[in-house]
Amino acid sequence: MNKPVRYLLQAINLGLFMLLIAAFSSGPAVKQLEADEAVVTLAFGHAGQPVRECRARTPEELAALAPNMRAPMDCPRERSVIKVLLEMDGEEVFNLDAHPPGAFKDQGVDVYHSIIVPAGKHRFTVRLNDSALIEGYNHTGEYEADLAPAQLLFIDFNAGMGGFIFN
C-alpha cells in the first residue's frame, strides 16, 4: 500500500478513536448522591485482645519443653472477635462480628462500611468490643453532626488516641 493511502487511513482511524473518547468523556452523566444526601464512612484496622490471659507455666511444664521453648509465660496468639455497632438517631445501621484472619487467628481486622444518609442533624453512636473477656462493649463513641449535602463524615478508631475519632 502506498504512503498517502496509509496516512489517510491512519488519520481516519485516529479521528474515530478521538470521537469515541469524546463521547464517553462527556456522558453518560454519573450522579453519586442526590441533592439532600450525605455519606457516613466507618473505616479502621484493629487487632482484638488475646482470647485469654497469659499464665505462668509450672516447673514441670517447663522441664517437659525443649530448651529453646522454655518461655516462663504461656500467652495465646489467638485474638478476640471484633464486634462493631453503628447507630444513627438511636437506630442500628451497621452491626458486624469480624473474626480475626490468619492461620492462628492472630491478625488484625479491617473494617470498612459506607452508608448514604439524609443531610441534616444526626446523632451517631459507635460501639466496639475487642475482648472476649468483657461482656458488652468496651469502647463507645458518640457524635452529633449537622451534615450538609454531599458532606462526608469519617469515623475512625484508634485505641491509643482514646477511641473513636469523628472527622
Image (cartoon, rainbow, N blue to C red):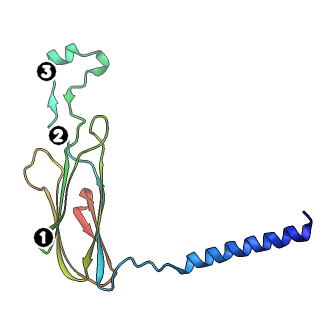
Please provide percent x and percent y for residue 166: 26, 70
Q: Nearer the viewer, residue 9 or 125?
A: 9
Q: Nearer the viewer, mark 3 or mark 2?
A: 2
Amino acid type indicated by mark 3: Thr
Q: Which residue lies under the disc numbered 3?
A: 58
Tags 1 and 2 in contact by the CB under 8 Å rule? Answer: no
N-terminal label among 3 and 2:
2
Amino acid type indicated by mark 2: Val
Please provide percent x and percent y for residue 24: 56, 75
- Element carrying mark 2: loop
Q: Distance of mark 3 from mark 1, alpha carbons? A: 50 Å
Q: Which residue lies under the disc numbered 2?
A: 51
- On the picture, is 166 further left or further right than 58? right
- On the picture, is 133 further left or further right than 166? left
Q: Quadrant of residue 144?
A: bottom left
The C terminus - image quarter: bottom left
Q: Which residue lies under the disc numbered 1?
A: 91
100 lies above or below 73: below
Q: Distance of mark 3 from mark 2, alpha carbons? A: 21 Å
